[in-house]
Amino acid sequence: MDGCLKLNFSRRELSGILEACLGLKFRANPFDGPGGAGLRGFYVATKALKQPLVCLNTAHRRTAINSAFWHEMGHHLTARLLSPQEESTALSFGSDFDEHLNDPRELAADMLVSLVCYSHSAAKRLFGPLLRKDSAENIHMVVSAGRTHLDSVWGFNFEKQVPATQNLHYLAGTIHFARLRLALLASPTSAVRGQKRIFQ
Ligand SMILES: [Zn+2]
């Protein structure tokens, strides 16, 4: 499985592990009403709560739930470094990838998603040839590498499993996380700069 991490715990086991190891409360519920369908999850850490809280919307597909989980974990793991605004809640929607590029907290959270999705060896195999051939900006090749990986390692093919109306949305996510991993592979110490350069 190429060293990728997967969620193989029951919800109760995962909740216990997160609380014991990270002092984190974990909730996972379907929010599929008109106000919550687009929500992927959120992270909130305020003085009013005894523990930080991660909540996921389980009304989405497994791949989207997994990426939301690691995104919210990214918020938790970088909270002390990037000093979250007190009393703020980091809501995550599936369509705000571009905005994340200009927000260090959101970008850091997305970096964790990308690193979990693409192990170092997978990133080298998939994206290394693109960097060597100076083809990192060839969107077709980047998407092709990302889709191959999602299908073979994560068992996800958005063309077969997702209604046509949602395909663009999953395509945008595939591009975002593949490009982010490519930028991290190309220059881990200046990934933010690299990510912005590749996107422009
Ligand atoms: Zn976020």
Image (cartoon, rainbow, N blue to C red):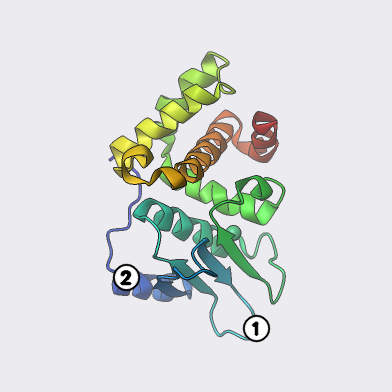
Mark seen at residue 28: none
Q: Which quadrant holds the C terminus?
A: top right
Residue beneath disc 2: 11
Q: Is residue 2 visible?
A: no
**Callout 1, which amino acid?**
Lys
Q: Is the residue indicated by label 1 positioned so its CB lies within 8 Å of ligand 1? A: no
For disc 2, the neighbor class at 10 Å (few under 14, some 14 to 19, many from 20) is: few
Residue 2 position in % (x across, y down): 31, 38
Residue 178 position in % (x across, y down): 50, 36
Residue 107 placement, left or right of 58 = right
- Residue at (49, 49) in percent of width and height: 113
Residue 192 position in % (x across, y down): 67, 40
Instruction: Place residue 8 in its image quadrant.
Output: bottom left
Residue 149 placement, left or right of 186 = left
**Which structural element holds mark 1?**
loop
Residue 194 placement, left or right of 115 = right
99 relative to 127, above or below: below
**Callout 2, which amino acid?**
Arg
For marks 2 and 1 on the same chain, the one whose residue lies earlier in the sequence: 2
Q: Quadrant of ligand 1?
A: bottom right
89 relative to 65, above or below: below
**Which structural element holds mark 2?**
helix
Instruction: Place residue 52 in its image quadrant.
Output: bottom right
- Residue at (40, 70) in percent of width and height: 30
Mark seen at residue 47: 1
- Residue at (49, 64) in percent of width and height: 37
Q: Is the residue indicated by label 2 positioned so its CB lies within 8 Å of ligand 1? A: no
182 relative to 114, above or below: above
Residue 120 placement, left or right of 195 = left
